[in-house]
Amino acid sequence: MAYEAQFYPGATSVAENRRKHMSGKVEKLREISDDDLTIILGHRVPGTDYPSTHPPLAEMGEPECSIRELVEPTDGAKAGDRIRYVQFVDSMYNAPSTPYFRTYNAAINFRGVDPGTLSGRQVVEARERDMEELAKFQLETEMTCPALACLRGASVHGHSLRLQEDGVMFDMLERVRLENGTIIVQKDQVGRPIDKKVDLGKPMSEEEAAKRTTIYRVDNVPYREDKEVLEWVHRIFEKRTMYGYKPAVQE
Amino acid sequence: METSASDTKKPIQIEIFPKRMMKPDTVEGLLNKLCSLEGIQRAFIQGPRLPTKVPFGPAVGTPVHHPLRTNVHFGKTEMGLEVLVGRITLELAGKEVMEEINAICVDTLPCDYDIREGRFIQTRQTVSDFAKRGPGADPVICGLYDPKSKVESQVNLLKTNEEE
């Protein structure tokens, strides 16, 4: 029988969602066109070619190298794309994902990406078209609620604040707003106004966000209720502290 | 033995802490009702600042036009709201109005809230205050402004018939 990765312990809905995010087996909830995504990211004008930093690899004549033969370059690397970034911010109030699980999702399921995990934001650097593939995946699936998560290249501090009255995460630059029950993006990642308003669809209800979140909270699924997770965290902490990841020393 | 603020004749301070950040309309409604009560000496609103321009990043200097940064009216006084209000601190002459404040919050706030009693506004000048304002600073506005800013931009005295 082939080995199947288990990804994360636990029996609660939060643990199950964490497994989903890590494995990439997440439900697609919305459709965002390539042009809309390009507008929100703000790195290039929609419809234009990807600017490149070097000629396509096929034209460059690569040196003989066993590793280069073994590893197929990503589409972005093949074409010589620039390195560009996407940065997500997730609210602490039951946002579906968190920086850690966005990073797990990126590192496990995508090639050629460089995720950076911070307390309030998660940035991924990659060749432009590889980055867009990841950004589209994370935006279109249940990893993102348009009201509780946002693309923010600068000024991310709303993630730790209480939500606004309308249930949208605070943003001092007001990149997104709730209009007629749907979330409309009106500025790009860094706060430049965009020509076309992008509709990200309806936000999740409070109940749905609580069901899809990967965050343990005392007012939803408390961390200490997940006995299996707690047991494994204790086990890893003890092994790391006592034996420096050398369990054999214990015996 | 020290005595707590609640069992002396000294003013007491309370903090209204809603579970959601309040829209300007809600703040206006809430504070207008609170203003009508007797015995509220000072009020302090706090929340994240709403900038007029993007302060950093590649789009620095771009106008923000945040719709929540607006003017609100308290009785006859107009005030520019530069923050999204997250909490309101009140200084009361006594505990008699607590029930009325609670009733106003129930009527006005669209979400749950907490009301806590404690010490939320500073009582003495800090070194920064002293360096900026000197020894003759008005003790009534102590703790209501940032030492780096102008008092007029952060402290509003409500206009009343008696011109208090």
Image (cartoon, rainbow, N blue to C red):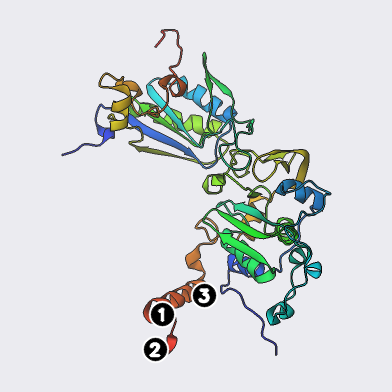
Which secondary structure lies at badge 1?
A: loop
Front residue of this view, candidates B4 and A49: A49
The quadrant of the rendering that contains the C terminus of chain B is top left
Front residue of this view, candidates A203 and B12: A203
Do badges 3 and 1 share one subunit?
Answer: yes
Front residue of this view, candidates A8 and B119: A8
Pointer 1 residue: A244
- Measured as percent of width and height from the top left, residue A21 is found at 65, 66
Q: Quadrant of residue B2?
A: top left
Q: Quadrant of residue B71?
A: top right
Numbered tag placed on residue A249 in the rendering? 2
Q: Is A26 on the left-hand or right-hand side of B156? A: right
The quadrant of the rendering that contains the N terminus of chain B is top left
Question: Of the residues shown, which amino acid type is indicated by label 3?
Answer: Glu
Do badges 1 and 2 share one subunit?
Answer: yes
Numbered tag placed on residue A106 in the rendering? none
Question: Of the residues shown, which amino acid type is indicated by label 1?
Answer: Gly
Give the mark, 3 or 1, whose residue is nearer the N terminus: 3
Whether pointer 1 and pointer 2 mark residues with C-beta atoms closer than 8 Å, the reply is yes
Pointer 3 residue: A228
The answer to whether any part of residue B11 appears in the image is no
